[in-house]
Image (tube, rainbow, N blue to C red):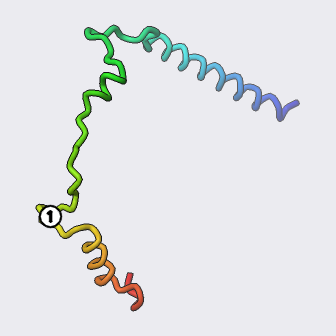
Amino acid sequence: MKKMTPILIIVVLGLLVGGVFLFRELRRAPLMPPDYDHPAKPVNDWQRSIQIDPRTDYTGTGSKKAPVPERLRMEEQRQRPEEGRN
């Protein structure tokens, strides 16, 4: 019984402290969601507002960087895994 008493006291104190924190949090937190000035926009309307890009040329010829396959090949050459680098 002497070993159980400190454990019971710690458990009861822990529950009391947890209850106090929970009570404080519930008093501060709003229970109702805030009222917005504007009505929510339905998801379908939101999705319709997204414009689709009809272009099919995504080669990146106008970019300053090399195209992705070329960059990967150059990086592979730089690391040379067959020589044990990196």
**In the displayed structure, would residue 10 be above or below residue 84?**
above
**In the displayed structure, would residue 4 be above or below residue 79?**
above
Residue beneath the point at 44% across and 8% down: 32
Residue beneath the point at 63% across and 19% down: 16
Q: Amino acid at mark 1?
A: Thr
Front-lying residue, 20 or 2: 20
Residue beneath the point at 44% across and 14% down: 29
Residue beneath the point at 16% across and 67% down: 65
Farthest bottom residue in view = 83
Q: Where in the figure is residue 11, as x and y percent of width and height?
A: 71, 27
Q: Residues within 10 Å of mark 1 (few under 14, many from 20)?
A: few
Q: How many numbered markers are drawn? A: 1
Q: Where in the figure is residue 78, as x and y percent of width and height?
A: 29, 83
Front-lying residue, 85 or 56: 56
**In the displayed structure, would residue 76 be above or below residue 15?**
below
Question: For residue 2, which quarter of the picture?
Answer: top right
**In the displayed structure, would residue 44 be above or below residue 73?**
above
Question: For residue 45, which quarter of the picture?
Answer: top left
Front-lying residue, 1 or 16: 16
Question: For residue 1, which quarter of the picture?
Answer: top right
Pointer 1 residue: 61
Left or right of 12 on screen, residue 3 = right
Q: Quadrant of the C terminus?
A: bottom left
